[in-house]
Amino acid sequence: MELTDEERQIFCEVADTFEVPEGAYNFRVNGKSVGRKSTKNINVVPKEGGRGLDIYIKKGTKNETVHIPVAISVTGLKETVYNDFHIEEDVEATIIAGCGIYNCGPTDSVHDGVHRFYVGKNSKIKYIEKHYGFGQGRGGKILNPTTEVYLEQGATAELEMEQIKGVDSTIRKTSATVEDNAKIFVRERLMTHGRQTAESIYDIELNGKDSVADITSRSVAQDLSKQTFKATIIGNNKCRGHSACDAILMDQAEVHAIPALDAKTKDAELIHEAAIGKIAGDQLTKLMTLGLTKSQAESKIINGFLA
Amino acid sequence: MLKLNKISFTTGGSRKILDSISLKVRSGEFLVITGPNGSGKSTLAQIIIGIKNPTSGQIIYNKTDITNLSITERAKMGIAFSFQQPVKFKGVKVYDLLNVASGAMMEKAEAGKYLEKVGLNPEQYLLREVNDKLSGGELKRIEIATVLARDAKVLIFDEPEAGIDLWSFENLTKVFKKLKAEKKTIIVISHQERILKIADKIVILENGKIEAEGAPEKILSQITGANYGIN
């Protein structure tokens, strides 16, 4: 693949590689696929007009990986991409997505990525999504991911979603319907700085008997940035749901946590936890007694918190 | 090595916690400061490391006045401090904390040795987060391990026995005996008779003043029966 230095940097940050990975993949740069491969078990099919992909993972596929990172390196590009994952029964697969924007121009660049996962019975998927922005232009770096997960009986989805830095505005929508014995685990890590804004919205419906949802969000808001965390878990059956929002506030930043638990039956066990506050003084003091300066101690605490 | 000159500390509410404390700690000396609750022991320890600033008085360390130096500067000069209440961190692992303490990225095996010294199995603890999933005793032992990893010249322990079980306490006394054999300069705030017995010198604080100081054989007999909370 021929890539600019900025595109390589994006792929390194969001997919840990800019080289052709093992397994199936599609690398998208500035609205076009620059490399695509299917495997015996994973078929990567482009939608018409370059509007996204249909990815089919065959029944019984084990320990396979799909990379579908996206890079935008031109100013003013706005795109909406639909990637649909059709995952049959008894699959174990990892999907590495993620998007980065390099914008050194005057106009906003926007990537709206819609990922829909149809996960068959007893399949287990791990989805890793990293978002990153850089470039000194006046144009914004805007990423709005929508993730929809449909889990059939006994299926498990593990979502690791991370916004590393540099994204000026994001609205992150994640929804799931969870059937009998199915489980969804979400681990979100978010960092905002400057005047950035980030909104995370979760809507999880626990429809099945013994279904499980666990959402853990940790975020750091610096400077004048603003974050909103809205998590709704609906328990329609005997189920367990837990959401936790942990945020470190710095400078003049703001964080709003809006939890909602909706138990439609007495057998639904739903919990929400939220903790928002500045870095604890005793944490800084402890690290300073170990020889760090105050700013080094802050970095250590933040890096650990978001790890 | 360390000299306190007329250290006083008064709270914002004008309550005098320390009243003109003068004290010398020789290089390689094992000093235990004891006394009843509220006598100012922990405040004195916190003043030495720089967490609190004295209202008046001077702290001289190796002939340098460190009274106005920051915590970080004192730490870099070789003063280490073990907190009475260990601090918890979400996301920071024991291994991370030991690396910060040693000032370098250690091999896991090397970092694990500091956990072994406090009776913790490195395989079980090195990659654990220093969070509230650990018990008070485990956190305390990790706290002490971070101080050992400092390779400091002066080690200050604020009630190291607080919150740890008997087995850990056995280990703790062994750690102190070893540090003493290594000729480290040690200041321990303690109510424990077995720690007092290791001391070269004991200081009794009461109502913010030094009530007595001297060798254990002299002081221990003096405090027997007195209400100093000695266990």
Image (cartoon, rainbow, N blue to C red):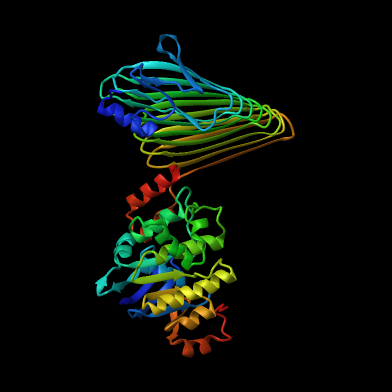
Which image quadrant for residue B148?
bottom left
- At horizontal 48% and vertical 90% (from top left) the residue drawn is B217
- At horizontal 52% and vertical 28% (from top left) the residue drawn is A201
Up the image or down, B21 lies above or below A214; here it is below
User: Which residue in the rendered view is the most extreme toward the front?
Assistant: A40
> Is residue A42 rendered to the left or right of residue B111?
right
- Total labels: the figure holds 0
Query: Where residue B157 sits in the image (x, y, percent)?
Result: 44, 70
Residue A37 shows in the view? yes
Residue A133 shows in the view? no
- At horizontal 34% and vertical 76% (from top left) the residue drawn is B6
Q: Nearer the viewer, residue A81 or A248?
A: A81
Query: Where residue B188 sits in the image (x, y, percent)?
Result: 44, 74
Name the quadrant of the C terminus of chain A: top left
User: Which residue in the rendered view is the most extreme toward the top?
Assistant: A49
Q: Nearer the viewer, residue B165 or A23?
A: A23
Query: Where residue B122 sits in the image (x, y, percent)?
Result: 48, 59
Name the quadrant of the N terminus of chain A: top left
Which image quadrant for residue A305?
top left
Up the image or down, B74 lies above or below A150; here it is below
